[in-house]
Image: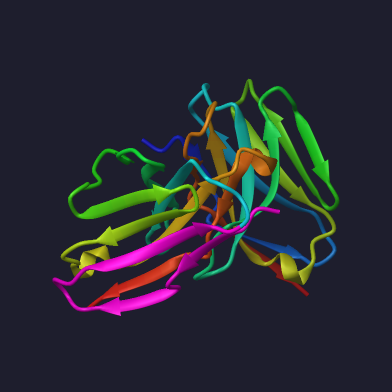
């Protein structure tokens, strides 16, 4: 049973436009969520996080929105740049020092 | 920020041999470290949680006798894949919990294991 789902395996966006990556979860006990960027054969690089008590967190070009009632979060990247092309993972965690539960990732391709 | 070093970055071994992967927290002490495995085009799957000075906790379906985890110090955890088989070929990633920024998770750069 997949508790964190990223239903879009890939997404293609034109440079300069907004990229929106979506993530759904089923476990209501998750109390924080993180987005990671990953290149092949490398470890994940942290992008942005959000606590379950918030509905929005913004950091530069990256904004994460959380809709707890829908158990849905999204990552907005604006404006999209060629260097943003990578696989993006949504991850969720519970309280304390728990491991993270990851989605399958979305491959974002920024087209010039 | 917190840095986690993972070695080796890639290793090729013969079936039946054992391989050790190291994960070090370079500038912080990590009482808890995590080991993940990623198959191609799949998500990162948590294999086990390693606590310094105690036995690791394995996720369901992960063989503890096959994947030996040692967390002997606050800065080092090791994963040993014993009697490796081709189906163990995967990308293994460690994460150390620093309890600070980013909810405390810092990832290593991963190890590509190929068993031939």
Q: Closer to the camera, A47 or B26?
A: B26
Residue A71, percent from left and from top: 59, 27
Name the image quarter holding residue A14.
bottom right
Q: Is residue A7 visible?
A: no
Q: Is residue B72 visible?
A: yes
Q: Closer to the camera, B76 or A63?
A: B76
Residue B104, percent from left and from top: 61, 41
Q: With A93 as the anchor, is B112 left or right in this view?
A: left
| Quadrant assignment for the C terminus of chain B | bottom left
Check the image and report above or below for B37 versus B34: below
How many callouts does the rendering have?
0
Check the image and report above or below for B4 versus A6: below
Q: Closer to the camera, B26 or A16?
A: B26
- Which color scheme does this rendered protein use? rainbow
| Quadrant assignment for the N terminus of chain B | bottom right
Residue A47 part of the magenta-drawn span? no
Q: Closer to the camera, A77 or B11?
A: B11
Residue occupying the point 61% across, 50% down = B28
- Residue range highlighted in magenta: B1-26
Residue A72, percent from left and from top: 62, 32
Residue occupying the point 33% across, 51% down = B70
Residue A62, percent from left and from top: 79, 49
Residue B14 part of the magenta-drawn span? yes
Name the image quarter holding residue B93.
bottom left
Q: With A102 as the anchor, is A45 left or right in this view?
A: right
């Amino acid at each position: 049973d997949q508790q964190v789902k990223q239903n879009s395996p890939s997404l293609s966006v034109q440079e300069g436009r907004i990229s929106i990556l979506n993530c759904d979860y089923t476990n209501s006990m998750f109390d924080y969520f993180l987005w990671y960027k990953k290149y092949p054969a490398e470890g994940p690089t942290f992008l942005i996080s959000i606590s379950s008590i918030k509905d929005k967190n913004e950091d530069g070009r990256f904004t994460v929105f959380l809709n707890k009632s829908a158990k849905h979060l999204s990552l907005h990247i604006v404006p999209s740049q060629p260097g943003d092309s990578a696989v993006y993972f949504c991850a969720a965690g519970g309280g304390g020092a728990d491991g993270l539960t990851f989605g399958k990732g979305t491959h974002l391709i920024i087209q010039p | 920020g917190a840095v986690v070093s993972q070695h080796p970055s890639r290793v090729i071994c013969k079936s039946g041999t054992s391989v050790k992967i190291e994960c070090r927290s370079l500038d912080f002490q990590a009482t808890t470290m995590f080991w993940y495995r990623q198959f191609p085009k799949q998500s990162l799957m948590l294999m086990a949680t390693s606590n310094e000075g105690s036995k690791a906790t394995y996720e369901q379906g992960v063989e503890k006798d096959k994947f030996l985890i040692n967390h002997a110090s606050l800065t080092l955890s090791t994963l040993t894949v014993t009697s490796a088989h081709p189906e163990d070929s995967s990308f293994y990633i460690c994460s150390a919990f620093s309890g600070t920024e980013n909810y405390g998770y810092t990832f290593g750069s991963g190890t590509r294991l190929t068993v031939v």
